[in-house]
Image (cartoon, rainbow, N blue to C red):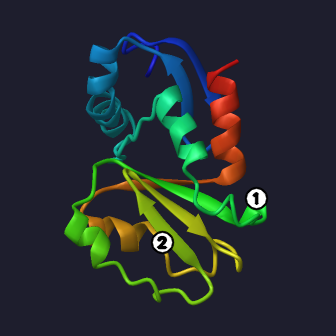
């Protein structure tokens, strides 16, 4: 679908919807709706598409507030938001929603520290999507750093 839309150097990484490609900025701006429409037409599912450039992903990595705390890599996750959340919505998030878990919203990302694992947290995509009025997609830290590495290879 990405190649058909005009992207170059299209590669996927693991089976969770990670696609690395090159595209002109004008095409990149249209890709989320274009690819989402193609998925709906071909498979019958309405799936949101969230994109990040290599530069944006590098910033995500540099801005992780939990790295300074020397947190174990397997406890770190990032939710990538499709839209910039309203400041008031971010302020209304419940910091005690999932005891022992922590989060920080920075721009269009929600950084998660989940010491008890992603399966036990109440800090879910559904929670953040509903509270921030957007759509998110999550990745573990290992995948985030690997995607960045592949984008810059």
Quote the CA–CA distance across marks 1 and 2. Answer: 19 Å
Q: Position of residue 41 (x, y in %)?
A: 30, 34
Q: Which residue is drawn at 36% across and 46% down?
A: 47
Q: How crowded is mark 1: few (under 14 residues within 10 Å), some or many (20 or more)?
A: few
In the shown orientation, is residue 24 left or right of residue 65?
left
The residue located at (27%, 15%) in the rendering is 26
66, 52: nearer the viewer: 66
Residue located beneath label 1 in the image:
73
Up/down of 29 relative to 46, above or below: above
Which quarter of the figure has residue 17? Answer: top right
> In which quadrant of the rendered view does residue 66 lie?
bottom right
* Pointers 1 and 2 in contact (C-beta within 8 Å): no
The disc at residue 124 is 2
In which quadrant of the rendered image does the N terminus lie?
Answer: top left
Instruction: Find the residue positioned furthest to the front.
Output: 68
- The numbered mark, 1 or 2, whose residue comes first in the sequence reads 1
Please state the total of marks drawn on the protein image: 2
Residue drawn at 51 percent across, 71 percent down: 103
> Is residue 118 positioned above or below 17 on the image?
below
Indicate the position of residue 112 as horizontal and vertical percent values. Answer: 56, 66
> Which sits in the foreground, 41 or 86?
86
């Amino acid at each position: 679908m990405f190649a058909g839309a005009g992207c170059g150097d299209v590669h996927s990484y693991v089976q969770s919807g990670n696609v690395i490609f090159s595209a002109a900025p004008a095409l990149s701006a249209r890709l989320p709706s274009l690819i989402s429409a193609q998925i709906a037409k071909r498979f019958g599912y309405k799936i949101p598409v969230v994109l990040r450039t290599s530069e944006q992903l590098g910033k995500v990595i540099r801005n992780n507030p939990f790295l300074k705390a020397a947190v174990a890599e397997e406890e770190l996750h990032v939710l990538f938001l499709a839209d910039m959340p309203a400041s008031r919505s971010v302020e209304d998030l419940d910091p005690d929603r999932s005891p022992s878990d922590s989060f920080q919203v920075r721009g269009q990302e929600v950084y998660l520290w989940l010491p008890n694992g992603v399966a036990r947290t109440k800090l879910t995509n559904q929670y953040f999507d509903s509270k921030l009025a957007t759509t998110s997609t999550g990745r573990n830290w290992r995948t985030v750093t690997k995607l960045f590495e592949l984008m810059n290879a």
